[in-house]
Amino acid sequence: MNLFNVYPLYDITPVKAKGSYLWDKNGVEYLDLYGGHAVISIGHSHPYYVEKLTEQLQNIGFYSNSVNIPLQSELAEKLGKLSGCEEYDLFLCNSGAEANENALKVASFFNGRKKVIAFTKAFHGRTAGAVAVTDNKAIVAPVNYDEHVTFLPFNDAETLTANVTEETCAVIIEGIQGVGGINVASDEFLKAAREACDKTGAILILDSVQCGYGRSGKFFSHQFSGIKPDLITTAKGMGNGFPIGGVFIAPKFKAKHGMLGTTFGGNHLACAAAVAVLDVMKEEALIENAAKMGEYLFEKLSKLEGIKELRGRGLMIGIEFEQPVDKIRDSLLFEHHIFCGYAGKHTLRLLPSLAITQKECDTFLQALEEVISVTA
C-alpha cells in the first residue's frame, strides 16, 4: 500500500526537535519559524510537556467520554483563567475543522437557522461544514453543500452590517486570517459584526484556531477589540503537537445530552498535553513573550529593503513581497536552514514558537536580508 499523494513534500526528514530547532536524519539543524502550521506553541519537546505526557501514558492513555475524566475539568479551569473567558463552557474535540463544525451546529441548534456569512480568503477547515465556509472552491467537493453560505469582503464593516439579517444563522470570522494572507480583522469590523449579530439574533463565531492561544500577544486576537463572541474555536497551539481542539460556548447556549459528541475528543493524553501547554505558557510568560518578540520582529523587518507590506500581530506575521515568495522561502530553507511558511504567492508566513528568543529572531533577520539582496 502507498500513501495517498496529496502533499507536496520537501526532501527533508526531521528526526529530532528541541525548542525552536529541528534536526534531520543527516544531522542538519534547522531553525523552525513555522511550527508545523502554528501548532508548536511552547517549543518542541519541552521537558515539562514530555514529562506530563509520559506520566499520563504510564497510567491511562485513553477512555471514552462515558466516564469521568478529571483532566477535562482541570483543562477547562486553567484555560478559562489564562484566556480570561471563565464564563464560557468548553466542548473538547480533535481539530480546528471539528471545532468549527461543532460551533456551526451549536449556532444552528440555537436559532434554528441555516444561512451563514463568511468572508473572502477565509479558511475554516476541510470537513463538510467547515469547508463550505472556506473561500477556496478547489477544495469544496460537490457533496459539500454550500448554497447556504454568503461570502462578503473581509474587513468591510458597512457591507457586513447590510447583509446580516433575521435569516442569518451565524457570522464566522478569523481574528487574523492565516491561509488567506495574515489579514488582521480590524476593531471596527469586529465591533460591527458583534452589533449586527446582537440586532438580528445571529451567532458570532470567532475562528481562533490559528490566531489564538497567545500567538497575537493576547490569548485571542479579537480581545484587542474588546468584543465577546458567542462561540470561539481553538486548536493548533492547544496541544503543542498532540491533536486537540475546542469550542468556547457562551452561557446563553444550554447543553443537552447527545447534542454534540466525539470519540477521541478530550481523551486523557490530549488533556494532559493541553494542561501542560497552559502550565508552561503561564510559568514562562509566553503570551507576553509573543507580544515582545513580535514587536521586535516588526520593528526590524520594517527597516529591510525589498518588503512591500508587513501584516499581523505578535508572532503571526505576514511579509509580502512584490515578487513571488517561493524562491525566498526555498532559499531560507535549503541555504540557511530556516523553516517558514507562505500564504498565497507573495507572502512569507511566520508562526514560530511563542518561546522564540531574540537571538533566534536575529538569525532569521540576517538570513532574510541576505536572501532579499540576492533575489530582489
Image (cartoon, rainbow, N blue to C red):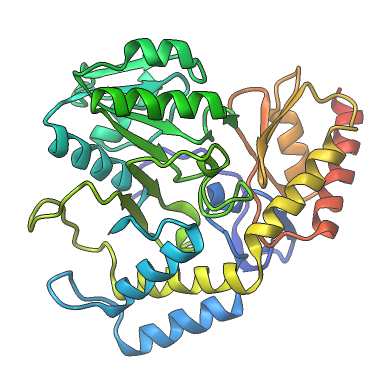
Q: Give above or below for 376 relative to 12.
A: above
Q: Is residue 334 visible?
A: no
Q: Give above or below for 150 relative to 286.
A: above
Residue 13 percent coordinates (x, y): 59, 57
Q: Residue at 35%, 26% (x, y): give it.
A: 139
Q: Give above or below for 190 relative to 3.
A: above
Left or right of 139, for residue 114: left
Specify the farthest residue to the left. Answer: 257
Residue closest to the eye, 146 or 24 = 146
Q: Is residue 365 visible?
A: yes
Residue 69 percent coordinates (x, y): 24, 77
The quadrant holding residue 195 is top left
The quadrant holding residue 182 is top right
Residue closest to the eye, 109 or 123 = 109
Residue closest to the eye, 186 or 140 = 186
Q: Residue at 29%, 66% (x, y): give it.
A: 266
Residue 283 percent coordinates (x, y): 62, 74
